[in-house]
Image (tube, rainbow, N blue to C red):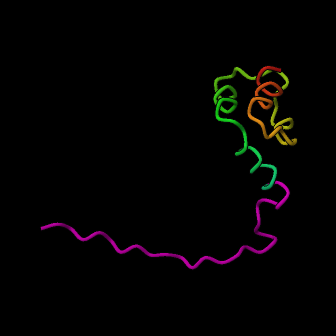
């Protein structure tokens, strides 16, 4: 006889107050920019093959939309 799984209980979602918010919209926008990095660039950064000047502060600045230009400016630097 199979056992019935315990019922799942969901909490009602509510919008956090400003005091509870952990991220500002500005910070979130800058972090979302990282999703625009070319896959080759992400792999190079994770493998430690990025240029010595590539820092999180640099990645928070706007990067070229063209993936080839990104590689030249970030990884090959």
Say how many tags the image has. 0
Residue 65: image quadrant is: top right
Quadrant location of the N terminus?
bottom left
Residue 25 point in image, percent of width and height: 82, 61
Residue, x 21% and y 68% (percent of image)? 3
65 versus 16 height, above or below: above
The foreground one among 13 and 25 is 25
**Is 6 colored magenta in this rendering?**
yes
Q: Nearer the viewer, residue 42 or 48?
A: 42
Q: Residue at x 64, y 35 (%)?
A: 39
With respect to residue 6, does 75 lie above or below? above
State the extent of the magenta-drawn residues as a range. 1-27
User: Residue 39 vs residue 22: left or right?
Assistant: left
Relative horizontal placement of residue 61, taking residue 47 as reference (left or right) = right
The quarter of the image holding the C terminus is top right
Task: Work out whether 64 lies above or below 1.
Answer: above
- Spot occupied by residue 24 in the image (x, y as percentages of width and height): 82, 60
Drawn side of residue 3 relative to residue 35, left or right: left
Q: Residue furthest left?
A: 1
> Which quadrant would residue 60 be assigned to in this image?
top right
Q: Is residue 6 left or right of residue 68?
A: left
Q: Is residue 29 or residue 8 the one in the foreground?
A: 29
Residue 69 in picture, x, y percent from top left: 80, 30
* Quarter assignment of residue 71: top right
Residue 38 part of the magenta segment: no
Q: Does 64 sit above or below residue 21? A: above
Q: Image point 69% across, 36% down: which residue?
A: 38
Secondary structure that dominates the magenta span: loop
């Amino acid at each position: 006889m199979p056992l019935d799984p315990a019922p799942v209980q969901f909490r009602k979602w509510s919008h956090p107050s400003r005091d509870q918010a952990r991220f500002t919209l500005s910070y979130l926008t800058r972090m979302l920019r990282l999703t625009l990095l070319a896959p080759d660039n992400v792999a190079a950064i994770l493998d430690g093959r990025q240029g010595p000047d590539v820092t999180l502060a640099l990645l928070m600045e706007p990067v070229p939309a063209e993936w080839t230009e990104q590689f030249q400016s970030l990884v090959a630097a």
